[in-house]
Amino acid sequence: MFLEILVYGGVASAIYAMLAIGLTLIVGLARVFNMAHGAFYMLGAYGVFSASQLLNLPLGVAVGLSLLVVALIALMVERICLRPLKGSLEGTLFITLILALFFEEIIHLAFGPAARATPAFLSGRVVLGGTTVPAQRMLVVLVSIVIILGLWVFISKTKIGGAILSVSQDQESASLMGINAKKMIVLVNGIAACLAALAGILVAPFLSSSPTMWVMPLIKSFTIVILGGLGSVIGSIMAALILGYSETLVAFLISPRISELVTLIILFLVIVLRPAGLMGSKTEA
Amino acid sequence: MKRMKKLHRFPVLVAICIGIGLVLSGMVSSELQAAEDVFKIGVVTSFKMECGTATLKAAEMAAEEINSQGGILGRQIKIFSGNSESDPEKGIMALKRLVEKDKVHVLLGGASSGVVLAQMDYLKHYNIIYLAVGPSSPLIAKKVAQNYDKYKYEFRPFVNALDVCKALVGDELSMLVKKGFKKFAILREDAAWNRGLVKYIQGNLPKVGGELVAVVDFDPKTIDFAPVFSKITASKADVAIPIIAHSDTITLYKQWHEMKPPFRMVGINNPGMNAKYWDQTGGACESEVNVTWGVILRAKITPKSIPFFDKYSSKYKEAPHACGSTAYDAVYILANAVERAKSTKTEDLIKSLEDTDYVGSSGRFVFDKKTHDANFGSIEYCPLLVTQWQEGGKFEILLPKEIATSEYQDPPWLK
């Protein structure tokens, strides 16, 4: 049981981390609460299903194509819907929520209400200390670790990463230093959408794809971003581990029926007790 | 001079007014005429569920057939639809719109028990009959039996979950016990319709030689079943009994197949009651055993079953859902009741429906006069089928033996 909790908690945390890091980057950089973030996760899952199962493209091509399409959609959303609102909290919240519902309806019309099954990228099972884990789930953990490490290197070691950090700390000062803040926001929107889509692509083989699959991941992503502290990547990773393992512990040790309550309880406690989150300062709240 | 001009205009204005009046009255009377010529059926169901979309498609197909044969008492059937979205409040709104705005004569549909139970309180007020297709809660029948005067408007040409339970324990699970699998664990989605079923299984499983070793509940929104499978594996059950109607079982079976836990899946899986399920799960439903009803596969339940299956499949490019064949039959049951009553008045129709004895595609429909439930569960009426998906995507009937096409097969990893 202990090993099962360790492995399955790790899988859940890895998915949550990929979803939340993109969201926290956008919140930190553009101060936008993008409610369409969960829809990018859904579009990634449906994209790989359509490309691999309906167009019969090789899996690698299907994954690449799905990421590309979602990134393009995210960039269009940024250009057409978000930029004109100039960071208005209510405006961006409202329009991205409408977009998420719009994407849900489009998917519902195109694919119907039933879940769609994407075949596993890796078949077979891995035995870890007596616990058998499907290889696809181990793939999620490995890919997430690689992607998160890669993102960390990109942000902390490259010039563009430095520019992103500067814009997230102070947009005006960054502009005075010659950094094009708009370009950085566009780039981060693209990265965030690709991370969400990749999470959707990786879970599609074992969680399936359905038109409402974006809702719970969105709620969980926001919980993680708030728990981790707005804009904090490290905070989001810590929060993803806390949420992933809390849910798994409750599901395995108490009952799977109440595991979803964990998210709501954590969200409530953070808002009441520590609104700035784990890594946020009090002034940020 | 000005005054003269005005006077000249007066008859012209009167003529225009009379003309408009005549046109309008003509329109109104022709509309009234049209309304008289049409028998309106309001399909109120959840179009977010496959049961709901199948209900509408099959009702439209039946209406087209009946219309091509002259309609009901010479009146053409027209189908209207309202989406309940599986939400009782939206279901009531949709019902009100169909009755008040579209002026439908009869309601058909339901899909979910929670919605139908809420809608039933409005039937007497609107004096309208409701043929419930999709909901299986025993509470629906109980309400009719306990307060007949208020709820007599509801008829269910669909299965009651208690009948499904009887088939589940008496036929499906006893078949497994006979094969040597004696330990069972219930895998139950937390929903209104199946709350009483656990008790029934607990009480009746020992009678067929089985033992209930665990009950694992899960939220219908669950998408990761690893903890659920872990609990069932820990209980050492030979067989898991899913009792599921609203959850995503495509994901459930994909994960079962992917994790290959040491138990079989033999139970009630409503979303799996369609011939597309093999493709929907990518073949992961192989070895799944289910209690089903209606025409979901090409089997001769009655002489009308295969013609219905073929026509529906050809028209909609998909095999019918169980709600499809029962909705199709429901429209014919209604037409049959109207023809016998020679009336469309609600009171006359209730009496006529209570006297129904109609052979449709899903079986022979006879309603219980106290509960208004159709008789499901025996080969003489509407049979319940125990089906299994087998290697290569073959959808086989295991029971009743009169129409069985194959024997039970274990999952490949347990053989």
Image: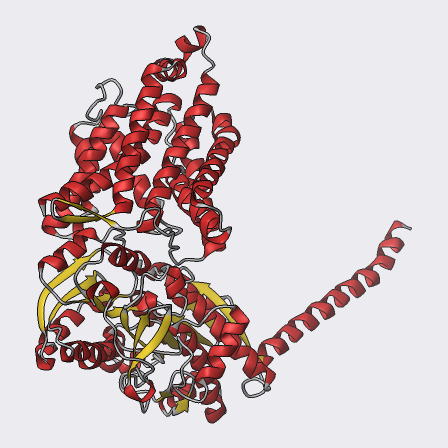
Q: Position of residue A194 (x, y in %)?
A: 41, 34
Residue at the image position 40 percent from the left and 29 percent from the top: A191
Q: Is residue B257 above or below residue B178?
A: above
The quarter of the image holding the C terminus of chain A is: top left
How many labels were placed on the picture? 0
Q: Is residue B63 visible?
A: yes
Dividing the picture into quadrants, the one containing residue B291 is: bottom left
Q: Is residue B95 visible?
A: no
Q: Is residue B99 above or below residue B350?
A: above
Dividing the picture into quadrants, the one containing residue B106 is: bottom left
Front residue of B89/B330: it is B330
Q: Is residue B120 above or below residue B256?
A: below
Its colouring scheme is secondary structure
Horizontal placement of B210 versus A51: left or right? left
Residue at the image position 63 percent from the left and 73 percent from the top: B31
Identity of the residue furthest to the top in this view: A177
Q: Position of residue B140 (x, y in %)?
A: 27, 75
Front residue of A110/B403: it is B403
Front residue of A169/B306: it is B306
Q: Position of residue A58 (x, y in %)?
A: 46, 46
Q: Position of residue B249 (x, y in %)?
A: 30, 60
